Image (cartoon, rainbow, N blue to C red):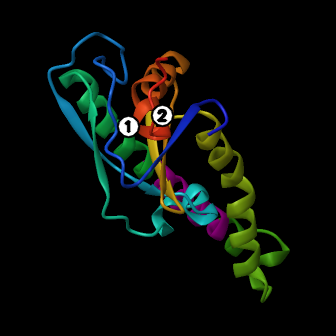
Amino acid sequence: MPLASTVELSKSITPTWPDICVCCERPAPESTVTLPVNDDSWLASWAPMFAKKMDLHVEVPACPRCAVELHRRRIVRKVVGICAIVAVSAATYYTFRHFGWLASHPMRRIAVVATTIAICFPFAVLTQWIPPRVRLNFNKGRIAYEFRSNRYAQQFRDANVVVYFGQSTES
């Protein structure tokens, strides 16, 4: 995620979270939200519906309002992506079927797929450049904790430096 700060920890390490909400950064959230850890493959980042199913979840501190917001945004992001692909495909298919020289051409289906990809690609890039508040990705035995807030990422890194490096930072 280009506009996010990333902290990587081993899958076997249980992270220590700062005592603030991951979204609004208010102190001492009284609840947590369970977020899934995503597959960090190339296909999963560009087409989330084809991602490997991971049975790995992490409890993240969030106030109740932000917890609801995190779940809502995850669902809306997936639904909007799928609806956009379906709508663009249907509109392109209809246009190529009823208008233009491709109406009876055998390459019509390939043209529909290529046009759908060309139209949806900028939106896929945009969703990668505008990060959610927190995203958890798994790759090669490590979990990448990606945060939109640099301040929260630094506090998370500081809280886990002892666990991560296996030594204390104090002399």
Q: Position of residue 76 (x, y in %)?
A: 38, 43
Q: Which residue occupies the extreme front position in the image? A: 171
2 and 1 marks in contact (CB < 8 Å): yes
Please give the name of the residue rendered at 39% of the width and 25% of the height, measured from the top-left corner: 159
- Residue 82 in the magenta stretch? The answer is yes
Residue carrying label 1: 73
Please give the name of the residue rendered at 65% of the width and 36% of the height, measured from the top-left corner: 129
Q: Secondary structure at mark 1?
A: helix
Magenta span dominant secondary structure: helix
Q: In front: 86, or 35?
A: 35
Q: Amino acid at mark 1?
A: Arg
Q: Which residue occupies the extreme right position in the image? A: 101
Q: Which residues are magenta?
A: 80-94
Q: In front: 157, or 144?
A: 157
In the drawing, does residue 164 fall left or right of residue 64? right
The quadrant of the rendering that contains the N terminus is: top right
Please give the name of the residue rendered at 64% of the width and 45% of the height, measured from the top-left corner: 123
Residue 51 visible? The answer is yes
Q: Position of residue 24 (x, y in %)?
A: 36, 15
Residue carrying label 2: 132
